[in-house]
Image (cartoon, rainbow, N blue to C red):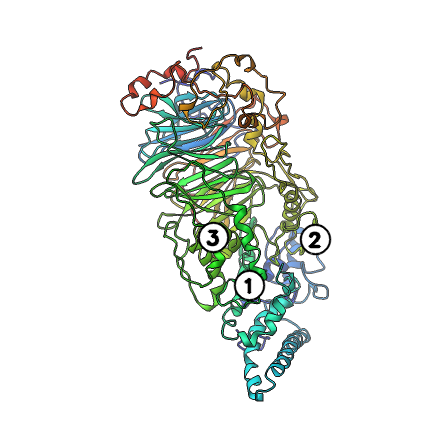
């Protein structure tokens, strides 16, 4: 990282001060964010181009560049990528960057000299060049208005600044990691911007905010990083559930992912080959992400690692890679309206919906959790209860009346659902068959089920009905012919 | 061979191209209408596999019936047979040899319909409606997998009344898909589990849902060498997540995209967000189709991350969709899915199944 270019090391966007890996990406960004017509979404090449388009095609004037920071909204400045940026703004930017690097360099020098006081001065100076690089690698994230400042990562703040300051001692292990992250950062932005269809969304920024948090996954993690590791052990209890009657089913080995510190190529069986190549490039630039995959891949039975590795930011993220919907009850608007149409509507819907849908509808008999289906900018076309459309519809008496029609037995309490268990037809229930549903609570029929509710279990005994228990039909091949006798079953004419 | 007796006696099949009248928007795409559609909402569609010559379409509906049509190359659809459950039919699937059809119903059973003899027998029993049914054909075993609202996933040898295996689900099963040796089940409360089916079915991984809303439909996709490698998951919030099981770079490779939303970005009216009712992958191109409550279908290229096409809006939600074995035919059902609740249900409204030629429109876009 850091071929000295005249344009200040990395291409950056004059309109919003963001940094990019490479000029092509910068241009894509500008086209999608700043030079996109808000009426027809056509992407123009420059600010003046956009203005002219709006005037000619839509007869509308526009006076500011969309999504630009104040002071940089001039629509008449012809800027394309890095070309056209006024000299004074370039200087300003250079100064800004230098300031930042100088600040942290100074800090480092001080630390060095403090620590290596007894050493000769050469020792401290020899460390100097190295800190510069990784720090510059960190610079861009910090300079972005949109990027969550490092302290934003939950649970990590106390750990990070000291880590960065303490880089010299960590030298051997760290540099390979850091340069790897900003590229990833920009890669994701590139994906966000480069979609062609209107409705494509951002990829999940699985590794973004934990940029500084990725090191915890690496081997030889300094003992100073336990906090990030903390949350993980909390995951397993949440996600494990053993299969019940599963003869011979493999039980998942419960080894926690955290206990496997060393990175290694994934040992998963090639059951579900990856889209690209299988296998982990253990190169420095992608060590971080590959490590997180390693954990999920090699421990195929580990829920927590998977959840962690992928779901650092599950779901839609804003352009700053903060999850849009992760703050129920506190935010109703996303942090950065850079994708105004998309993020706002999703965020408000998802955040509000999330907060209510997150209420667990635990037992079936309790009233199901409700969704918030309406928000300021969008409306979910779905009934309020958080049950599936089919479940809702199936509760209707109309769809249950059919079940009893065969005059079938009601099953008192089907044991396991195997036919073996449900033999004798139980009398006395039939009267309830027709349309007696109304009193039932919404989840009545299933709730009823589980509680052995008296009487009517719709469709309890499927029409096989010819009196004799169902067992005979299943004896295997030979009895097939007798089953051929069953046609009446289908037409509901059966034995009724 | 019984024809569909309950409907207004329909004799032979003929291509009914009911030209749309001036205000009638039931078929804005001018696709082929399947004759004698069911009388109530269609919940599931399935085309016959490659092993069966010709194309046969199966549809399960809320009128408790399962219907079978032959679809001829000229587009003519001929009703062939029908079977009944005692509750609405929620899922249908074919066996790999095309001789049997499995049907899952709200009557808590699943049945196996032998098309040659036109007999159907019960092969599965649950304690709550059976939401999904899939045929699994492994080198060393074959069975039927049923997922139910009773929170279990059961595997049945069709000859025995007791399941070969029962797996507990964290919640009610809402949708599932099987492409050997992988199976995915999505449940209520956004549960998501992947199973591996080699030797015997076992849980492979539980995945934290990439979506923030109720799961509604799921479809597995394959990689270039035809092995299942990931799945597409749709929710009620007009969004589909593309998720790879073992991607080289999960953060980059997995993504979600929005779909089935009304245009709310520019106007001042709030955007309407519709549920994704079905997802189907084109068997040859690997591109996918989604259908939604908004009454539209869309085609997408997940590798180029672009939308290929969106249809006009039908006057009813599109409740189900599927491709035939070679991807030339795309079938979609237009019927009410309950997305606006009981109030908007009109039992008099006709339900349709449309067939569209999908060979050209689903070709992948060249990556830019």
Q: Residue A27: give x, y in percent of width and height.
A: 57, 64
Q: Residue at x 65, y 41 (%)?
A: A356
Give the letter of the chain under mark 1.
A
Is the residue marked by circle 1 packed among few (<14), some (14-19), or many (20+) residues within 10 Å? some
Instruction: Evaluate whether residue B209 shows in this view.
Output: no
Mark 2 element type:
loop
Q: Report the front residue among B223 and A190.
A: B223
Q: Is disc 3 in the same subunit as disc 2?
A: no
* CA distance separating discs 3 and 2: 33 Å
Q: Are marks 3 and 1 in contact (CB under 8 Å)?
A: no
Query: Where A243 falls versus B120 (above or below)?
Result: below
Instruction: Please tell me whether mark 3 or mark 2 is closer to you in this view.
Output: 3
Q: Residue B66: give x, y in percent of width and height.
A: 43, 24
Q: Which residue is mark 1?
A: A186
Give whichever of discs 1 and 2 has the lower sequence position: 2
Mark 1 element type:
helix
* CA distance separating discs 3 and 1: 19 Å
Q: Quadrant of residue B322?
A: top left
Q: Is residue A346 left or right of residue B186?
A: right
Mark 3 element type:
loop
Q: Which mark is residue B304?
A: 3
Q: Is disc 1 in the same subunit as disc 2?
A: yes
Q: Is residue A159 left or right of residue B155?
A: right
Q: Residue at x 64, y 38 (%)?
A: A371
Give the letter of the chain under mark 2.
A
Looking at the image, the residue that sits furthest to the top is: A496
Instruction: Please tell me whether mark 3 or mark 1 is closer to you in this view.
Output: 1
Q: Residue B104: give x, y in percent of width and height.
A: 44, 28
Query: Where B346 falls versus A243 (above or below)?
Result: above
Q: Which residue is mark 2?
A: A60
């Amino acid at each position: 990282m850091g071929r000295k270019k005249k344009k200040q090391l990395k291409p950056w966007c004059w309109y919003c001060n963001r940094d990019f890996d490479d000029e092509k990406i910068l241009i894509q960004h500008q086209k999608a964010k700043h030079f996109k017509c808000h009426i027809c979404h056509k992407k123009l090449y420059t600010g003046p181009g956009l203005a002219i388009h709006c005037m000619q095609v839509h007869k509308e004037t526009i006076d500011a560049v969309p999504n630009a920071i104040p002071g940089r909204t001039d629509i008449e400045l012809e800027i394309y990528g890095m070309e056209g940026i006024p000299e004074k703004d370039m200087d300003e930017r250079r100064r800004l960057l230098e300031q930042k690097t100088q600040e942290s360099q100074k800090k480092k020098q001080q630390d060095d000299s403090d620590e290596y006081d007894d050493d000769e001065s050469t020792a401290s100076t020899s460390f100097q060049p190295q800190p510069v690089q990784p720090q510059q690698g960190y610079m861009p994230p910090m300079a972005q208005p949109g990027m969550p400042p490092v302290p934003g990562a939950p649970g990590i703040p106390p750990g990070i600044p000291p880590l960065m300051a303490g880089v010299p001692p960590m030298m051997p292990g760290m540099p390979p990691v850091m340069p790897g992250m900003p590229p990833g950062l920009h890669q994701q932005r590139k994906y966000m911007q480069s979609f062609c269809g209107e409705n494509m969304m951002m990829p999940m920024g699985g590794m973004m905010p934990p940029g500084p948090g990725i090191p915890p996954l690496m081997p030889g993690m300094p003992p100073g990083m336990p906090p990030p590791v903390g949350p993980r052990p909390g995951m397993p209890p949440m996600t494990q559930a053993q299969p019940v009657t599963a003869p011979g089913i493999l039980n998942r080995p419960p080894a926690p992912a955290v206990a496997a510190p060393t990175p290694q190529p994934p040992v998963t069986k090639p059951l579900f080959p990856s889209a690209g190549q299988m296998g982990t490039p253990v190169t420095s630039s992608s060590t971080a992400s590959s490590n997180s995959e390693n954990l999920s891949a090699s421990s195929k039975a580990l829920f927590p690692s998977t959840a962690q590795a992928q779901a650092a930011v599950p779901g839609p993220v804003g352009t700053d890679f903060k999850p849009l919907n992760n703050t129920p009850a506190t935010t109703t608007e996303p942090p950065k309206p850079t994708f105004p149409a998309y993020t706002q509507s999703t965020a408000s819907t998802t955040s509000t919906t999330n907060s209510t849908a997150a209420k667990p509808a635990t037992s079936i008999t309790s009233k199901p959790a409700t969704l918030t289906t309406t928000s300021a900018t969008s409306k979910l076309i779905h009934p309020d209860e958080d049950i599936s459309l089919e479940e809702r519809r199936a509760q209707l008496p109309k769809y249950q009346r059919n079940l009893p029609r065969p005059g079938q037995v009601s099953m008192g309490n089907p044991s396991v659902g195997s036919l073996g268990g449900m033999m004798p037809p139980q009398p006395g229930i039939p009267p309830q068959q027709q349309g007696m549903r109304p009193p039932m609570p919404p989840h009545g029929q299933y709730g009823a089920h589980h509680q052995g509710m008296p009487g009517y279990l719709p469709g309890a005994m499927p029409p096989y009905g010819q009196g004799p228990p169902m067992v005979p039909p299943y004896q295997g091949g030979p009895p097939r012919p007798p089953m051929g006798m069953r046609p009446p079953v289908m037409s509901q004419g059966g034995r009724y | 061979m019984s024809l569909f007796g309950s409907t207004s006696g329909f004799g032979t099949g003929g291509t009914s191209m009911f030209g749309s009248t001036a205000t009638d928007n039931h078929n804005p795409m001018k696709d082929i209408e399947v004759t004698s559609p069911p009388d109530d909402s269609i919940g599931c569609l399935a085309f016959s596999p490659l092993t069966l010559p010709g194309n046969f379409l199966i549809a399960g509906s809320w009128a408790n019936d399962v219907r079978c049509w032959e679809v001829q190359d000229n587009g003519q659809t001929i009703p062939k047979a029908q079977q009944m459950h005692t509750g609405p039919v929620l899922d249908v699937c074919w066996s790999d040899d095309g001789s049997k059809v499995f049907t899952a119903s709200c009557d808590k059973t699943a049945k196996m319909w032998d098309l040659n003899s036109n007999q159907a027998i019960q092969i599965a029993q649950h304690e709550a409606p059976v939401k999904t049914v899939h045929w699994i054909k492994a080198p060393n075993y074959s069975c039927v997998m049923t997922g139910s609202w009773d929170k279990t996933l059961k595997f049945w040898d069709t000859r025995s009344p007791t399941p070969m295996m029962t797996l507990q689900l964290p919640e009610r099963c809402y949708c599932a898909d099987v492409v050997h040796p992988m199976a995915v089940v999505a449940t209520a409360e956004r549960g998501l589990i992947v199973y591996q089916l080699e030797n015997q079915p076992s849980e492979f991984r539980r995945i934290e849902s990439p979506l923030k809303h109720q799961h509604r439909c799921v479809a597995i996709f394959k990689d270039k060498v035809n092995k299942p490698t990931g799945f597409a998951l749709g929710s009620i919030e007009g969004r589909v997540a593309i998720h790879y099981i073992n991607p080289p770079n999960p953060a980059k490779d997995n993504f979600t995209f929005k779909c089935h939303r009304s245009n709310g970005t520019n106007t001042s009216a709030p955007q309407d967000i519709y549920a994704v009712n079905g997802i189907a992958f084109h068997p040859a191109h690997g591109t996918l189709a989604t259908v939604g409550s908004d009454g539209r279908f869309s085609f997408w290229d997940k590798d180029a991350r672009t939308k290929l096409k969106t249809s006009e809006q039908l006057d009813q939600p599109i409740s189900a969709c599927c491709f035939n074995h070679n991807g030339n035919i795309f079938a979609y059902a237009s019927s009410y899915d309950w997305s606006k609740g009981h109030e908007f249900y009109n039992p008099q409204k006709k339900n349709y199944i449309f067939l569209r030629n999908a060979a050209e429109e689903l070709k992948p876009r060249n990556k830019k």
